[in-house]
């Protein structure tokens, strides 16, 4: 009976869930800017208490490892690693785009097309990958600038459902008849449950001391026009 605490902070959604044997039994999440630092530990405490457990009863901590927001991932991973150290529990890392695709498939079990989760990376760039209905990777995770020709090799003869906060801004560009869009939220820790349970059963754990988020791109510090003028 694997009891796993799951944390997802890769986007503007701050999400925490607790699963037992791959089934979510409690969760808490909220959408908004700059929520993670203030709310994450509070959400964790609420979720653990709502499940009727104490922290020592947990078997592992699972984190959505990215790609995504640099700040969000850093906060989520730091919190997860702190819990692993304090509780002496193993760390499980779930690829964020795979979690999103798994979430879509759990809500659409009869779907037979391809799945393309997208995380907004500003302007017309997204973090993305393409999966088949068995979660096999057809296009590995990459940072991709979207234009009218993107995914044409897939869209020419099969349906692709695009999802995530990066997909919404691409809807006007990706117009082939086989392109579908799902606006539901799949950046939720609830969709980590099955993947985290599989990783636990396979003892697919991370080295807590050396684990880092999957940022995909280096963090770039930008200055406002006011700061540039003052500099």
Image (tube, helix red, strand yellow):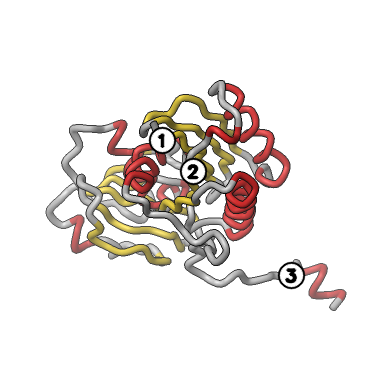
Between label 1 and label 3, give the one nearer the viewer: 1
The vertical placement of 153 against 200, above or below, is below
In depth, the one of 85 and 187 nearer the eye is 85
Residue carrying label 1: 2
**Residue nearest the observer in this picture, 215 or 220:** 215
Would residue 177 be seen by someone viewing this image from the given angle? Answer: no
Q: Residue 140 in the image: state x and y as whole percent.
A: 31, 64
Mark 2 surroundings: few (<14), some (14-19) or many (≥20) residues within 10 A: many
Residue plotted at (19% across, 58% down): 154
Mark closest to the chain's N terminus, 1 or 2: 1
Tag 1 near tag 2, CB within 8 Å: yes
**Quick one: SS at disc 1?**
loop
Would residue 25 be found to the left or right of residue 31 on screen?
Answer: left
Q: In the drawing, does residue 103 fall left or right of residue 84?
A: left
Residue 201: give its label.
Answer: none
| Drawn side of residue 159 relative to residue 115, left or right | left
Q: Residue at x 48, y 63 (%)?
A: 214
Q: In the image, is 196 to the left or to the right of 86?
A: left
The residue wearing badge 2 is 60
- Whether the residues at callouts 2 and 3 have beta carbons within 8 Å, the answer is no
Q: At which x and y percent is residue 168?
A: 43, 46
Helix, strand or loop under label 2: strand
> Residue at the spot x=45%, y=50% of the render?
92
**Dividing the image into 4 quarters, which one contains the C terminus?**
bottom right
Mark 1 or mark 3: which comes first in sequence? 1
Tell which residue pokes out farthest to the left in this image: 157
């Amino acid at each position: 009976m694997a009891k796993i605490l799951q944390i997802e902070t890769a986007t503007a959604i701050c999400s925490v869930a607790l699963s037992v044997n791959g089934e979510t039994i409690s969760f808490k999440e909220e959408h908004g800017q700059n929520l993670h630092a203030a709310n994450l530990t509070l959400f964790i405490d609420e979720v653990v208490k709502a499940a009727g457990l104490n922290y020592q009863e947990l078997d592992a901590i699972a984190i959505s490892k990215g790609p995504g927001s640099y700040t969000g991932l850093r906060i989520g991973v730091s919190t997860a690693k702190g819990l692993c150290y304090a509780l002496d529990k193993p760390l499980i890392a779930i690829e964020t785009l795979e979690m999103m695709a798994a979430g879509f498939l759990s809500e659409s079990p009869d779907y037979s097309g391809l799945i393309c989760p997208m995380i907004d990376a500003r302007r017309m760039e997204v973090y993305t990958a393409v999966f088949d209905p068995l979660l096999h990777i057809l296009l590995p995770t990459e940072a991709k600038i979207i234009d009218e020709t993107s995914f044409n090799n897939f869209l020419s003869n099969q349906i692709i459902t695009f999802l995530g906060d990066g997909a919404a801004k691409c809807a006007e560009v990706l117009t082939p008849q086989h392109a579908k869009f799902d606006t539901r939220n799949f950046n939720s820790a609830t969709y980590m449950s099955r993947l985290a349970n599989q990783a636990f059963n396979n003892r697919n754990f991370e080295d807590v001391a050396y684990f880092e988020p999957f940022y995909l791109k280096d963090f770039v510090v930008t200055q406002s026009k006011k700061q540039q003028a003052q500099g």
